Amino acid sequence: ICHLYEGPVVGGWYKVLDRFIPGTTKVDALKKMLLDQGGFAPCFLGCFLPLVGALNGLSAQDNWAKLQRDYPDALITNYYLWPAVQLANFYLVPLHYRLAVVQCVAVIWNSYLSWKAHRL
């Protein structure tokens, strides 16, 4: 489920972000990373975790309780990994390769998210 949801959403986000903040300077990369991690990452996780819960058959009440329990830790863990990855990605990697770079790092990240999403 991670890749079915993540690939199209993240790929589309990178295109929007590059149109909104064109350029590849260090300042441009920093702006992109801040928007990505300040806006996109919280929304992405807030949609991903309940989606997995719903697909696993959780009731709305159980899904909400699980989201309240797991979301803060998942977001904090996100901030340990992704800001540095995204800063390098936005500064050093051309747009058409960014999703591939993220997918390489996401092997580890998605394992964590899967564990978090499926934990009772």
Image (spheres, helix red, strand yellow):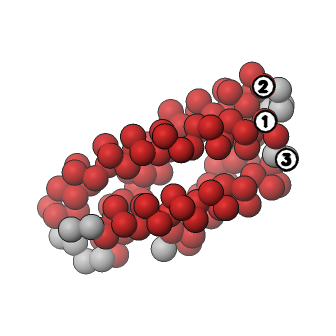
Q: Are marks 2 and 3 in contact (CB under 8 Å)?
A: no
Residue at image point 56% right, 43% down: 82
The location of residue 8, given as percent across then percent down, is 63, 63
Q: Label 3 amino acid?
A: Pro
Residue most extreme to the left: 61
Q: Identify the secondary structure beneath mark 1.
A: helix
Residue at image point 81% right, 46% down: 93
Residue at image point 41% right, 67% down: 114
Q: CA distance from mark 2 to mark 3?
A: 14 Å
Q: Quadrant of residue 103?
A: bottom right
**Above or below 107: residue 88:** above
Q: Label 1 amino acid?
A: Tyr
Q: Identify the secondary structure beneath mark 2.
A: helix
Residue at image point 50% right, 63% down: 110
Dot 1 corresponds to which residue? 91
Dot 3 corresponds to which residue? 94
Dot 2 corresponds to which residue? 26
On the question of residue 97 being in view, the answer is: yes
Q: Identify the secondary structure beneath mark 3.
A: loop
Q: In terms of sequence position, does the residue under pointer 2 or pointer 1 come before the other?
A: 2
Q: Nearer the viewer, residue 7 or 114?
A: 114
Q: Residues within 10 Å of mark 2 (few under 14, many from 20)?
A: some
Q: Residues within 10 Å of mark 3 (few under 14, many from 20)?
A: few
The location of residue 75, given as percent across then percent down, is 40, 44
Q: Residues within 10 Å of mark 1 (few under 14, many from 20)?
A: some
Q: Quadrant of residue 11?
A: bottom right
Q: Label 2 amino acid?
A: Lys
The location of residue 107, given as percent across then percent down, is 58, 65
Q: Are marks 1 and 3 in contact (CB under 8 Å)?
A: no
Q: CA distance from mark 2 to mark 1?
A: 6 Å
The location of residue 13, given as percent across then percent down, is 64, 49
Q: In terms of sequence position, does the residue under pointer 2 or pointer 3 come before the other?
A: 2
